[in-house]
Amino acid sequence: MANSFQNKVLRINLTTGKVSTEPLNESYAKDYIGGRGLGTKMYYEEVGTNVDPLSPDNNMYLVTGPLTGTMAPSAGRYMVITRGPLTGTIACSNSGGYFGSEMKYAGYDVVVIEGKAEKPVYIWINNDKVEIHPADHIWGKEVPDTTDLLKEETDEMAKVACIGPAGENLSKIACIMNEMNRAAGRTGVGAVMGSKNLKGIVVRGTNPVHVPDGERFMAAIEEARKVLAEHPVTGTGLPTYGTQILINILNQSGGLPVHNFRDSGTVEWADKTSGEFMIEHKNLVRNKGCFSCVMRCGRVTKTYKPYAGFGEGPEYEAGWGFGADCDVDDIDAICQANFRCNELGLDAISMPCTIACAMELYENGYLPKEDAGCDLSFGNASILADLVTKTAYREGIGDMLAEGSYRLAEKYGHPELSMSVKKQELPAYEPRTLQGMGLNYATNNRGGCHVRGYMTSPEILGLPVKLDPAVTEGKAGVCKTFQDLTGAVDASGFCLFTTFAIGADIIANVVSAATGIEYSPDELLKAGERIWNLERLFNMACGFTGKDDTLPQRLLQEPQKFGPYKGSVNRLHEMLPEYYELRGWTEAGVPTKDKMVELGLEDAFAQMLGAVEAAAAQNN
Amino acid sequence: MNIKYFAYIRDFTREKETTWNDPADDLQALLQQLSQHYGKKFREAVFNETEDDLNNLIIVLVNGRHVAHLDGIHTKLQASDQVSIFPVVAGG
Ligand code: SF4
């Protein structure tokens, strides 16, 4: 029966040059839906849990969801799944734009990259014609030039996903960029691509995507489209202001981390870096959307002297990172630094957070002036763009910034000043104000990450329910549900922002109509839970334990200095036991056999136990 | 009392903030005062149809706390309070 999968996996081995295709494993698709779930399952089965992230043995999976490339609204996502060099956990990074849908039109649900090319190469996928080309002439180029050159050499209509100098130089905070400004941003997936000597993947496709029952599918997506259009957030707020609108509300609510989380709470000048100000100050040129998006939250922006430039963004996280976290109140400097992240292929969350960490190390006298090579004081707007460039090329202090904040702070003897979980930098929500977001950060399978359980939504925005950010009671259950739902959304191909308006019922209906596999809302959430638990088993087999489900000591012990929640700390210990219980895990955070049998993960569970035992034996 | 406005609420107030002298002592009455001053669009944005509750599409913070976790539209106010009014927005 026709369904919205292309039912084909493309496998490319860069060591041997071999290109092959194989059918999609149907039972994986049913249990894991697609995208993040399918990629994690394939990675787990094919690679296992003990490869070095930057070795040729670490495969990279580019995976679309069953909705990617269909007419479903805001459903153009693809995911990159691999083992991440920044965290050592399973890494999965999600991007929008048009690359995912083009991959689907070329005829593939999954593109697997194995091995390592001897010299720089790029891959040219033109429907069923797949070629590996030399890329020596492009190696070293920034993302915009790379994208233009690759299109010139192949097809102007093609879509390009590539790395910039940061990925080539194996920065652990490098990302993969598609259509120049869309990023599979987090967890350092760009370094994995760089380690394979793979500069880019160019794709062009002209195949249709089918659905089993056109009428049913159109009715399902019409319902989703209507809800998205009528909801004030997805219909008006995101299109008008983009995500940078959050600056003021987080600031007024006392949830803005400031100075590497040292002086968090509220700052006087936040409005000068806000989404509202970017319109007033004429930074905003126009808004822009990903494939089939009705919300179009992307921003095309320009900046003025002395930070003149043109590009896209920033998203709220980057705007906060280069702004409040580094104590910079100049929106032009913030935007320019964000443009450089996109041009050089760096994660625009981890990059500013690592700079903020360096600033605190510097101000405390731990990072000497000779190493800094510049005045690294908080508030120095003039160094931001230059530090981003130095990071990508590993020049001077950039060589250490390229390793992310944890390794930087460790080198200077103060790892506690890295505001990270599992070595990935925390995003823009202060866990001493948003208690539930703290729980999400601590338990996240890819380290410090907000989008896998976006507790800001109920704790600050009141969506879909209003939860008091200061309270810990009841947060574990909501956090788990959000994490599971996000697992399913990331698997489907939908953009996560759709969930501000639509819930599991509409998503399940659209996915069922596209795939012909019937998911009730509960089954959809169950698939999300399965994905979450498989990621957890993977991480545990790699040596992570419940002890890693924690936050930087600062957030657990140092009272917040400013704002309405002045004096508070994150009370993780009040939420974590309940969270483990709701997950069906032991008090130490270990998944239980019963729960794993219920989720169909008994084999992965046995493998995890085996890996843990083997590691213990080796240590003895 | 200092009152701050954000996003499209500013289109109705034509100012980002105001110092409001002699404010009412609860939120409902304050919003009535402000509606009288700023007009119909502001009134429609902040109140529900019967004006006995907040519009679902509005977020009001008093001293940084969402009034849903205080006493809603009946939250008591003092002249030294900081009030912030937002439409429901989101991002991530
Ligand atoms: S909401 Fe924004 S990120 Fe999501 S698909 Fe639309 S434009 Fe892309």
Image: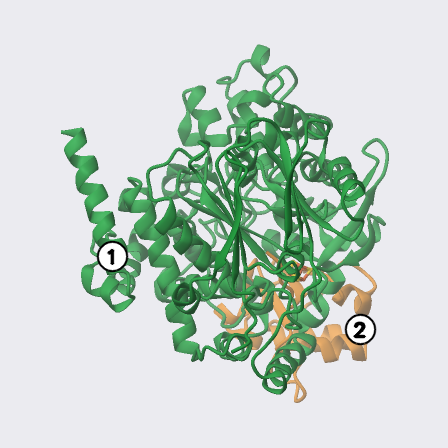
Please tell me how crowded label 1 is: few (under 14), some (14-19), or many (20+) other residues with Cα within 10 Å: few
Q: What chain is the green one?
A: A
Q: Is residue B8 left or right of residue A1?
A: right
Residue B84 in view (yes/no): yes
**Residue at horizontal 80%, vertical 72%?**
B38
Q: Is residue A7 left or right of residue B32?
A: left
Dot 1 falls on a residue whose secondary structure is helix
Q: Is residue A545 left or right of residue A297?
A: left
Q: What chain is the orange one?
A: B
Q: Quadrant of the C terminus of chain A?
A: top left
Give above or below for A556 relative to A238: above
The one of A18 and A336 positioned closer to us in this rendering: A18
The one of A175 and A339 positioned closer to us in this rendering: A175
| Amino acid type, mark 1 | Asp
Q: Quadrant of ligand 1?
A: bottom right
Pointer 2 indicates a residue of which chain? B
Q: Is mark 1 within 8 Å of ligand 1?
A: no
Q: Is residue A583 left or right of residue A449?
A: left
Closer mark to the observer between disc 1 and disc 2: 1
Residue labelled with disc 2:
B37
The one of B43 and A101 positioned closer to us in this rendering: A101
Q: Which mark is residue A603?
A: 1
